[in-house]
Image (spheres, grey):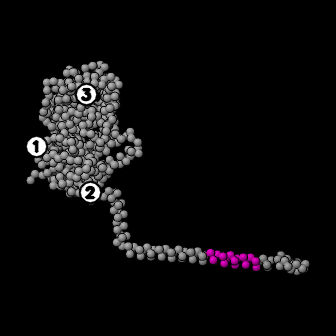
Amino acid sequence: MTKKIAIISSDIIDSKMAGVGIRYWEIANSLSQKFEVILLCPIGSKINSEKIRIIEFDYKNQNIKELVENVSVIIISGFTLHFHPYLKDLNIPLAVDLYVPFMLESLIWHKNDELERWIPDFEEFLRVQNELLRAGDFFFCANERQRDFWIGMLLANKRINPHQILQDESLDKLIKIVPYGIRMPITQQKSAKNVYAKYGIPDKAKIIIWSGGVWDWLDPITLINAFENLQEKNDNVVLFFMGAEHPNNLDIKMSLTSQCKALSSEIGLLNKKIFFGDWIPYNDRWNYLQSADLCVLTFRNHIETRLSNRTRLIDCLGVNLPVVITMGDFVGEELAKEGLAEIVPPEDQIALTKALSKMLDIDRNFLSEKFLHFAKKYHWDISVQPLVEFCQDAKVAIDKGKYLTEVERISKDKDNFLYKVITEKDEFLQKVIIDKDEFLEKVVEEKEIQFDVKTSELRSEITNQKLLIEKYQRNIFYRIYRKLKKFVGRDHYE
């Protein structure tokens, strides 16, 4: 009997979709070769498949328990467990995708907020992240660097523990790598006319393409400034942003696109040399990439960069498109090792201008064998193999429910104490009374001892005073004083 796998996407899966939607669409296609796949995606997902059962649902509000309670594995990510906490109580193995470090992204896009807002938002994102890490039975991420980070987070949540080490010292049964992939071979639908023509871009222009969204944690501002310098020496070059506006009405609004347009207008290049396109349909992106001469992606030096996986760079492999990218990204550095990318320091306008000029002159056909070799490693069917292996023999994690968080431990100790008080109240009250009586008896005893000591000290003082008086009265001066008083008749002084 074929196993059923449920994949829950937090983003819309449609002709126009972003990284998360693309990832789960392609994972679903690869898994469908061996399993019966149910793909649950938010309302607005208009996509069809003969191999996959696609269900639209209200991501935040609809209860989907009945839709998934008979599957063998549920694949989740992000805030899915937050909106659907009952999933962790179904006793169905949960495979958690950690490829988007949303907790780190939130730190970057909130950094201009007041701390009064930023702190509670950070704590909520961290709570949701930790909830995922405690609930999952298997985890997967996009690269080795991410895996190291998540191992630390799993350890902090007690998910790396004696049970896990006894099962597998390598932790491969707990967390593995499922890279962002590419579907090969590429099926291009390039027509004779220039796909950029509708934006007013000439056929013979050299096109630098920004492939993907203009997210607030990226740095297109440095790119626009560098491009201004570049086009002064090469007026045949244009810069095209392929995904200026996210198509799926994200709750979190990005402000960087408007800043980029304002800067482009200010330097007089908007819609002349710098163009902001619509979000390109997923199946049409090859036409734009194939017709471009260079892909570029720039970002600042921060923690999100270090642990990101720039997904749209993988698409460049399929069309032999060279890349210029800021240092720090895992995929970019892997491409650079093969000579398929030029790495520049963050926010270095001069270095970026030079790199753009250099890579525009590269012969793409000369690099085709390297591109093909690299692309084969990232084929979706190969990338998804660790997830396939888990689904084939999925089990609830061996350590689930055996280790408490600190909050749970403290709460349990408190609950145990209160339970003992309630169930043994008579014995407890009697013990309290006895302890009270013993305490009072001890207090009285100590007071009596103190009183006896004071009384003894007072008696000793009186005795000493009497001895002094007797001694004084025997003194010769006192006797002379007595005789003189009698002699002068002053007895009333007695």
Point out the tag, 1 or 3, that comes first from the N-terminus.
Answer: 1
Point out the tag, 2 or 3, that comes first from the N-terminus.
Answer: 2
Task: Name the amino acid, label 2.
Answer: Pro
- Residue labelled with disc 2: 162
Q: Position of residue 332 (x, y in %)?
A: 25, 34
Secondary structure mainly formed by the magenta segment: helix
Q: Which of pointers 2 and 1 indicates the residue nearer the eye?
A: 1
Q: Position of residue 307 (x, y in %)?
A: 29, 41
Q: CA distance from mark 2 to mark 3?
A: 52 Å
In this rendering, the answer to whether 473 lies above or below 56 is below
| Residue range of the region highlighted in magenta in the rendering | 454-470
Q: Which of pointers 2 and 3 indicates the residue nearer the eye?
A: 3
Q: Which of pointers 1 and 3 indicates the residue nearer the eye?
A: 1
Q: CA distance from mark 1 to mark 3?
A: 35 Å
Task: Name the amino acid, label 1.
Answer: Glu
- Residue labelled with disc 1: 50
Secondary structure, mark 2, is helix
Secondary structure, mark 3, is strand
- Residue labelled with disc 3: 240
Relative to 336, 268 lies left or right: right
In the rendered view of the protein, which quadrant contains the C terminus? bottom right
Q: Is mark 2 in CB contact (under 8 Å) with mark 3?
A: no
Point out the tag, 2 or 1, that comes first from the N-terminus.
Answer: 1
Q: Residue furthest right?
A: 488
In the image, what residue occupies the spot 23% across and 43% down? 11
In this rendering, the answer to whether 221 lies above or below 66 is above
Label of residue 204 in the image: none
Badge 3: few (under 14), some or many (20 or more) residues near its Cα, within 10 Å? many
In the image, what residue occupies the spot 11% across and 44% down? 51
Q: Compare residues 363 and 77 and report the one nearer the observer.
A: 77
In the image, what residue occupies the spot 24% across and 37% down? 247
